[in-house]
Image (cartoon, rainbow, N blue to C red):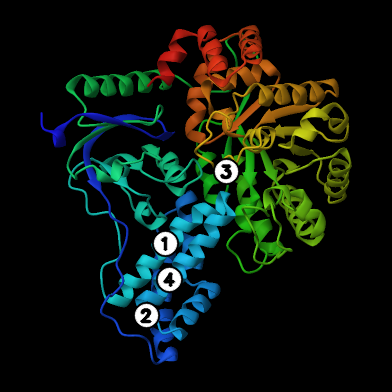
Amino acid sequence: MSEAAKTYQIQGLGVSAGSVYGPAVVVANAIDVDETEPATTDIAAGMERVKAAMKAVSTEFAEQAAATDGAISDILLAQSALANDRGLRKAITKKLELGAGLTHAVREAVNEYAQQLTALGGYMSERAADLTDIGDRIIADLRGLPAPGIPKLTEPSVLIAKDFSPAQTANLLPEMVLGIITSEGGVTSHTAILAAQLGIAAIVGAKGVVDIPPGTMVGLDGSSGMVWVRPSADVRANLDKKAQIRAAILAHSGGAGTTKDGYPVVLLANIGTVPDALSAAQCDVEGSGLFRSEFLFLDRAEAPTLEEQIEAYTAVLKAFGTRRVVVRTLDAGADKPLAFANQEKEENPALGRRGLRLSMAREELLDTQLQALAAAQQATGGNLWVMAPMVSTAQEAKWFVHKARGFGLHTVGIMIEVPAVAIRAQQVMKYVDFASLGTNDLTQYAMATDRLNPHMPDLNSYWQGAVLDMIKAACDGAHANGKYIGVCGEAAGDPLMALVLVGLGVSSLSMAAPKVSAVRFSLSRHDFTDCGAIAQAALAAESVEEAQEAVRALVAPEVLEMIAH
């Protein structure tokens, strides 16, 4: 076999389950600048051309958003706003004034803007790739070239790229896309979010995949994150078998979540937008355990009005009927800055004025939101629960509960994502009706590790003993006060960790809707006492690997078979 035709593997990060293989379609993203263009001498005329191109790109995004729904639509609307951003126009103008040609001015301004977003980290760093795509589209318009995009697929294929923009994935036909692999991106990238929503197997962060020749047979396992280049007949047969086994197992997973002996574990969906809610409400879930309300506020020049918020919350509550809907109040700041809530620059925004801290500083934002939530509840009679993010002390919890009750809201709780509250849960939980563990931030703060940093996966793992200790402390504190506690972080959607969490004392698990079936199946194969033993085994471990091995040794074989596929 020649060197070029060898079979080899690439390890990435699995973000959407599925075992598939097919021919590779490699998508190139970048549009080159016009190397022959002269320096701009008429700044005003040049900017008119640029503004026309920006508007054309913005309009195209808006039209695509109108033709779809769910997270895809909302991401495209955000792209539409960003494509016509005033700050970007100013940055391009400055480059023109320095003598750059039109396309060079756009490229330089976009690159600088993208670098600023990357430096912010978190959610905003993920927007850098989106901005780069917008720059490519503006340049393509200025040059009279086709916009970058996925070519028309003539057969079911595996799409490969450095990263995919929302516009590229907006019009994907799932029946023609077997899987998606990117060399960049993380668990919060748009590729990961959209693949999960569309039910397409996906792997991100697989370095080197863009070097795979187009048309090469590629296999991928969205659970393990493994990519096979030119998979052997045995590997392909194994991928087929995995897909068949997983489908057969999950086909019989339905109804309310319970352990094998009937202990109830409420299974809920995480949502971020009204279309998300409409989609999730059609799934076999018992409600929503996390409505990320900040998506109503991001990428806007002004805060959403009271009327806009009432309309959105009413639509969400109507979609779920009598089922529970847990709304997290505005969780902005740090990696999700708001244009209309400017604050002084902070050296470390992740440890600064974010979440409830921002709401306490800008009370009018929270007041409007709580008023809108109360109006939506009154209009629908919905089962509304409200919780505050980034709570650090009992005083903050008391402040929020008093504020929310003042607007007529009855079921009021907090997120437990700061170690201080997990440790002091017995004191803090006296003042609230319920709590929800945000395992993403709890892990980040407990282990002093940026949860988006791909270089320290073991430290940034909810399997760490210190994280499990904090979850147990929070559960013990809730139970001591007779209060309800659930989980709405990434850990809730892990079929093995779900057993640990139930054994530690949580009563509900909220996750991306496509993950519910696997978690439900896992719970149904274990008694409540089994979950307790599994939790104790994980707590006793001294490393992530040891914890996972200890849990696997106690888990039902059919669950191990499912997660292997």
Relative to 99, is 125 above or below? Answer: above
Which of marks 2 and 4 precedes in the sequence? 2
**Residue at position x 37%, y 71% in the image:** 138
Classify mark 2: helix, strand or loop. helix
Residue designated by label 1: 132
> How many marks overall?
4
Distance from Cα at disc 4 to Cα at disc 2: 10 Å
Classify mark 4: helix, strand or loop. helix
Badge 1 local density, few (<14 within 10 Å), some, or many (20+)?
Answer: many
Q: Amino acid at mark 1?
A: Thr
- Nearer the observer: mark 3 or 2; the answer is 2
Q: Amino acid at mark 2?
A: Leu
- Nearer the observer: mark 3 or 4; the answer is 4
Q: Amino acid at mark 3?
A: Ile
Residue designated by label 2: 102
| Left or right of 382 in this view: 193 | left
Distance from Cα at disc 4 to Cα at disc 1: 11 Å
Distance from Cα at disc 2 to Cα at disc 1: 16 Å
Place residue 322 in its image quadrant. top right
Badge 4 local density, few (<14 within 10 Å), some, or many (20+)?
Answer: some
- Mark 4 and 2 residues: CB-CB less than 8 Å, in contact? no
Toward the viewer: 248 or 365?
365
Toward the viewer: 46 or 454?
454
Relative to 399, is 17 above or below? Answer: above
Report if residue 507 is visible in the image: no
Residue designated by label 4: 108
Of the 4 image quadrants, the one containing the C terminus is: top left
Badge 2 local density, few (<14 within 10 Å), some, or many (20+)?
Answer: many
Residue designated by label 3: 271
**Residue at position x 48%, y 23% in the image:** 518
Which of marks 1 and 4 precedes in the sequence? 4
